[in-house]
Image (cartoon, grey):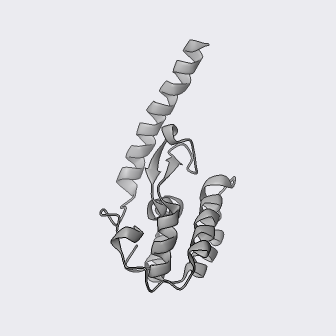
Amino acid sequence: MMYFFLLVIGYFFLTSDKKKKEHDSNYVIPNPNNDTNINNQNTATATISQEKAKALSERLFQIMGLDWWTSIDDIKSVLKDISTEANYKLVSYYFGERAYSNLGGGSTWDIFGEKLDLTQWILREMDSESDRKYLQKLFPNIF
């Protein structure tokens, strides 16, 4: 039993490193200073309530992390509801950092994934060129 456990743990570490290298070479994650954090930005111009921001952050987590597959259209629908960069920053604050699985994407236990903020989650899920252009058009100072 102990060998099986070690084999499973070894598999996660080996595949996690390979997948991470793939992401490192394919993804340019903006905002190295985490400027979507509410503590670093003025969100006084946000047009949504804190309760709505929490609900939108949980909806995005459900779409990207808990559903069996990620629906890009569902993500876009929520992003349209967010509509402004100030609102996005507020939603991002409530999203926080959550463990993202390097084995097929989505949520995972903290020990098996890397902690990513909302912007990083979205970029991992919306990784086509057309998706990136959509994000840059919607929130040009964030993406």
Quadrant of image for the C terminus: bottom left
Residue 27 position (above or below residue 17)? below
Residue 87 position within the rendered picture, expressed as x and y whole percent measured from the top left: 50, 79
Q: Is residue 72 visible?
A: no
Q: Residue at x 49, y 37 (%)?
A: 111
Q: Residue at x 40, y 80 (%)?
A: 140
Quadrant hosting residue 142: bottom left
Q: Nearer the viewer, residue 117 or 22?
A: 117
Q: Is residue 63 visible?
A: yes
Left or right of 42, for residue 126: right
Left or right of 54, for residue 93: left
Residue 104 position (above or below residue 15)? below
Q: Nearer the viewer, residue 19 or 109?
A: 109
Q: Residue at x 41, y 70 (%)?
A: 38
Q: Residue at x 61, y 70 (%)?
A: 56
Residue 119 position (above or below residue 20)? below
